[in-house]
Image (cartoon, grey):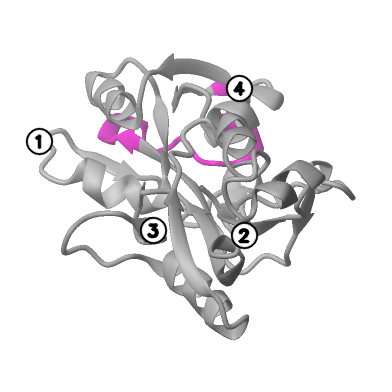
Amino acid sequence: VLALIAVGVPTAAAERAITVESSLALRICVDPDNPPLSLNRVGGQPGVDVEIAQAIAEHLDLQPRLVWVDTTYGGRALRRSLLAGQCDLFMGLPVDPAAETADALALTAPYYSTGYRLIAAQEHFKVTSGATDLREARIGVERQSGAHMRLERIGSHLVVYGNQREVVDAVARGEVDAGAVWLSDVDRLLHGRTTAIRPLADAAPDRSLRWS
């Protein structure tokens, strides 16, 4: 779940499925575990994406109805939710003009910029997010994540792991020179680590790892 809204244009099949009750609600697809953008947890702050979606619903004089969708595998999540008629809009998708079609999707202007940060152990702090290092360094990524797909396109030397915690563990063990971690997850995943692991010095994610 990334950085803008994708609005679904209902297909004929989806329109037939809309009841009188649902026509008074704005069904909002959003990731349940992507703080600070969205979070489905008792006692937790709902997140920026949820608040924006609720404001959109209020502006349209509709009741917001949240549909929690795991966006680990972005394309699959989109097909099984928005494109399947389960919601009317999807919060936090990346800017990708190729995804916009006349009969299925319409994208709004971007409202938030985020991305992946490269993290490294002390001995690899000289690695940067510049184009040369992104191709030459061994970089740990989460399987089928945005970082995996983006870095694969530019020919980076990738080592693929099952999740971001495994990526951080690999950095700590020295299996990779750096790891790509979603910006809002960096502090949580590095908290309490005894190995000296830090985000790389250049704070802004490189264009290859940035969404806006």
Q: Position of residue 106 (x, y in %)?
A: 78, 56
Q: CA gap, disc 4 to disc 3? A: 30 Å
Q: In the image as oriented, which residue stretches furthest toward the front?
A: 20
Q: Which mark is residue 194?
A: 1
Q: CA gap, disc 2 to disc 1? A: 36 Å
Name the residue: 27% across, 67% down: 45
Q: Which mark is residue 38?
A: 3
Residue range in magenta is 120-136
> Measured along the vertical axis of the image, is residue 150 above or below residue 48?
above
Q: Which mark is residue 4?
A: 2
Q: Which mark is residue 79?
A: none
Q: Which residue is mark 4?
A: 156
Secondary structure beneath disc 2? Answer: strand
Secondary structure beneath disc 4? Answer: loop
Where's the C terminus, which quadrant?
A: bottom right
- Closest to the observer, 99 or 136: 99
> Is 134 colored magenta in this rendering?
yes
Secondary structure beneath disc 1? Answer: loop
Amino acid identity at mark 2: Leu
* First in residue order: circle 4 vs circle 2: 2
Labels 2, 1: front one: 2
Labels 1, 3: front one: 3
**Residue 109 figure quarter:** bottom right
